[in-house]
Image (tube, rainbow, N blue to C red):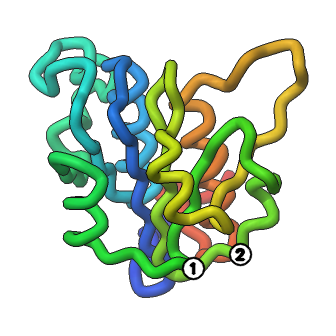
Amino acid sequence: MTEQKTDTAQSERHVVLVAPEVHWNTGNIGRTCLGSGAVLHLIKPLGFSLDHKHVKRAGLDYWHRVALRIWNDFDAFLAGMAPGPDEIALFAKRGPRPFWSLCPSRRMFLVFGSETRGLPETILGQYPDAVCHIPITGDIRSLNLSTAVGIALYDSLRCAGPFHAWGSG
């Protein structure tokens, strides 16, 4: 079996959670970030402690290996990471366009709001052309945050070089 790694020269992914509230969602998202080679950015305030056993349980024994950055606020994140306007995608259930209309760039920042409030208008207003949604039926209010991150993150990698540590067959 041949092990393949992500080609970081070809794609760089960042998942940004603004004020996440649910520890097990963040743990699951951390595990997904590790599995895809993405960096996880958490924007304070957090609705839980990162030392909380449930975050670690959701990330299983991988949590300590997650590439994690913690920021005091969204402005500090912007100053520290300096995403270009074509490198950022904001996810909101009322976003004007579907996520599959995004044109993935080499470096991308996928930004998600908290589980109960979503992204604040102050952030949505900074990038009005970068707001998108993941289509759902009217039968539910929203997708689980960790599910939405998984959908968006892996879709953003569709143009990246193939990677799969377990090979085929």
Q: Nearer the viewer, residue 155 or 164?
A: 155
Q: CA distance from mark 1 to mark 2?
A: 9 Å
In the rendered image of this protein, does residue 138 appear above or below residue 20? Answer: above
Reply above or below: 78 against 52.
below
Q: Work out which residue is located at the far bottom of the displayed protein and give it.
A: 9
| Residue projecting furthest to the left | 51
Name the residue beneath numbered marker 1. 86
Q: Position of residue 42 (x, y in %)?
A: 28, 43
Would you say residue 70 is visible in this rendering?
A: no
Front disc: 1 or 2: 1
SS at circle 2: loop
Residue 32 lies in quadrant? top left
**26 above or below 47?**
below
Above or below residue 75? Residue 46 is above
Residue type at mark 2 is Cys
* Towards the viewer: 34 or 86: 86
Q: Residue at x 50, y 40 (%)?
A: 119
Quadrant housing residue 104: bottom right
Q: Position of residue 157 (x, y in %)?
A: 61, 66
Instruction: Provide residue 7's location: percent of width, then percent of height.
Output: 45, 78
Position of 119 compared to 134: left or right?
left
Residue under circle 2?
A: 103
Q: Residue at x 68, y 52 (%)?
A: 169
Determine contact: label 1, label 2, CB under 8 Å: yes
Give the residue type that dot 1 points to: Asp
How many tags in the picture?
2
